Amino acid sequence: MHPILFQIGSITVRYYGLMYVIAITVGFFLLSREVRRKKLALSTDNLLDLLLWTVPVAIIGARLYYVVFHWNYYGTHPLDIFKLWQGGLAIHGGVLAGILVVYLFSRLKKVQFWALTDALAPSLILGQAIGRIGNFTNGDAFGLPTTLPWGIRFPAGSPAGMAFPGQATHPSMIYEMLLNLAIFAFLWSIRKKGFRDGFSTAMYFILYAVARSIVSFTRADSLWLGPIRAAHAISIAFVILFGAMIWRRKLYVTELESSSGRKLSPK
């Protein structure tokens, strides 16, 4: 595990940044494919515009979310706010900021918002899985000490190594990567089932909330809201909000069920 892929003079290429580039590239390919399949009125240039706006805003949102919870440090070290290569991007902040951009974009292009987010959901969770590889090489998003045989001792100079020198810790980022891949497989498998627009989006938020809540019990660098982990608080909100959305809007109903005249009211 080493954060630097290669270095030429003053130019340093880190695995952390490389994983984000791979995640964005793969995500864009899958999104383009889904947009074509769903026959959304968006060109490749439109999607590039969406990418160029969403990615930087999401990164800013992820960083600000993290910085707010660590203001005791960043308030006295403001220049460190810009050191993204050291880690410190909170996925919840990134997703919320990104969704805002997608909403504004859908209004501007007159595209149905939930249809667009359904097309985006598999790409997003796969990108998150790839990003966790960057966390692994960087030694951040690390876990608590463990005696389990798969515990990992990170290098002394990494965030995990500095927090728990010489101790094996939970590979929390790997746990989350595997769960994210499972969520991706599920979302990819249901995309052609004909569920109403918004169902895949809602399932993304619910399933990721559950996955992140499980992993957070092993995380050593959790953000806290008083006595509760911030990840647990926002995950509970996501499950309630999007669970209610599925139920009230009957998003679990497929186009086939709707067209056949099947009773749609919840039982």
Image (cartoon, rainbow, N blue to C red):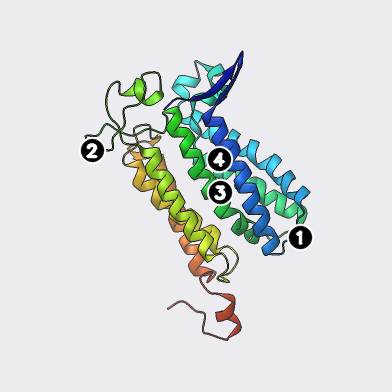
Label 3 – label 1 distance at C-alpha: 20 Å
Whole-percent x and y of residue 151? 28, 35
Q: Amino acid at mark 3?
A: Leu
Tag 3 or tag 2, which sits nearer the N-term?
A: 3
Label 2 – label 3 distance at C-alpha: 31 Å
Q: Which residue corresponds to the image point at 40% horizontal and 24% vertical from the top-left?
A: 159
Q: Is residue 54 visible?
A: yes
Judge from the rendering whether residue 43 lies leftward or rightward of residue 245; answer left or right.
Answer: right
Which residue is the site of mark 1? Answer: 41
Which residue is the site of mark 4? Answer: 94
Whole-percent x and y of residue 198? 58, 62
Label 1 – label 4 distance at C-alpha: 26 Å
Q: Which residue corresponds to the image point at 45% horizontal and 28% vertical from the top-left?
A: 138
Which residue is the site of mark 3? Answer: 124
Judge from the rendering whether residue 107 lies leftward or rightward of residue 65; answer left or right.
Answer: right
Tag 1 or tag 3, which sits nearer the N-term?
A: 1
Q: Out of 190 and 75, give the one closest to the viewer.
A: 190
